[in-house]
Image: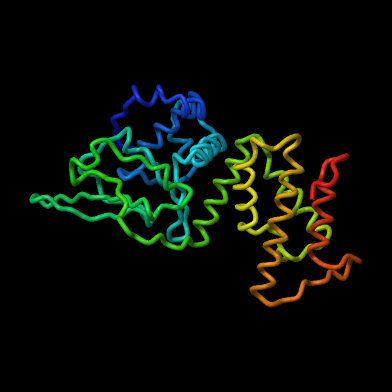
Amino acid sequence: MARKRLIDTEELYFDTEIVKLLGDRGLHLYIRLWGLAEDWGGYEPKYSDIAFKMGALEFKTEEVETFINKLIGDKKIIPYQKEGKTFHWLVNLLKHQPLDNPSLPKIPIPKWIDCKEQEYKSGKKYAKYIVIKSRLPVAYRSATSSPRNGNSNGNRVVTIAKAGEKLPVSDKPAENLVLKTLLKQVYKSKFNIYQLINKFKKEAKRKRLLMFGENYEIPAEILIEVSQSYLKNKVNIKGEHFPWVISAMSKASSAWWVRKQDLEHLKIKINTGTSRGGEIENLQDILKKMLPEGVVNAL
């Protein structure tokens, strides 16, 4: 059942960035998510259910997913995995929704939220949440906002960072979520990196490029490096961006392959179906063929 929320429309409707990002319908969805989320900001992203709960606005499932992906790319929502499922956490819910005596969680909470059960003399229970910034995924640590009146009441969610706390080592799901966020940021900047990835995968399969495994999936480590480099340098790229990204992927892939060989003490595999000297040469050939006509010396 959706929760009743007190919305600070004065601040929300004059947030030009979020209004520009989502438009009218997306903003309605964002507000609706606050009502559907638990008091600490978590919810399970069942897109079809959310679309149904948009009522007379008649949202389609694909539309809900598109707007939520925009919110993730803009760091308004942090996805996380628990018990084999994906959940979402609304970063700024408490900025617009101060809470007294939040209820206990009904879905698994992420590792960056500490929950302590409290009890009144009457026996009624409520929760005290603490959000620990140092446990957030690295890409999101600057995105959280402290709730209004955050420290004035021990029953409200507060945002703190423990002094001297060591940063945890990211696990694989967290790394994948970081990658998804970076790819969406690249796509949002008007470069279709998904098209490049799909094109590369098709060419790699056709050429039997096995350095990335039998599924021909580009390792997350490479895509993260390429995406970060592109977002950092895109304003200085002259001409078409596609050759620049191809060149960055070539360098990152070659460096990754060398590191892999050093770690595993393996020799570069020779593809018996081609006369090229090895996987690196095969990789370079595929990337060159992906370049637009007339583009040379990009690698």
Q: Position of residue 179 (x, y in %)?
A: 57, 51
> Residue farthest to the right?
275
Determine whether 119 is above or below 275 in the image: above
Query: What residue appears at the point 69 percent right and 77 percent down from the top-left corner?
Result: 265
Determine whether 55 is above or below 276 in the image: above
Q: How many numbered circles does the render carry? A: 0
> Residue farthest to the front?
236
Query: What residue appears at the point 66 percent right and 75 percent down from the top-left corner?
Result: 264
Horizontal side, residue 187 vs residue 31: left or right: right
Horizontal side, residue 79 vs residue 125: left or right: right
Determine whether 167 is above or below 64 in the image: below
Viewer-nearest residue: 250 or 37: 250
Horizontal side, residue 186 vs residue 54: left or right: right
Viewer-nearest residue: 283 or 60: 283
Q: Position of residue 149 (x, y in %)?
A: 23, 37
Viewer-nearest residue: 251 or 290: 251
Give the quarter of the figure containing the N terminus. top left
Query: What residue appears at the point 52 percent right and 35 percent down from the top-left corner?
Result: 67
Q: Position of residue 161 (x, y in %)?
A: 32, 51
Q: Position of residue 35 (x, y in %)?
A: 35, 36
- What colouring does the structure picture have? rainbow
Determine whether 262 is above or below 200 in the image: below
> Residue farthest to the left?
121
Picture quarter containing residue 296?
top right
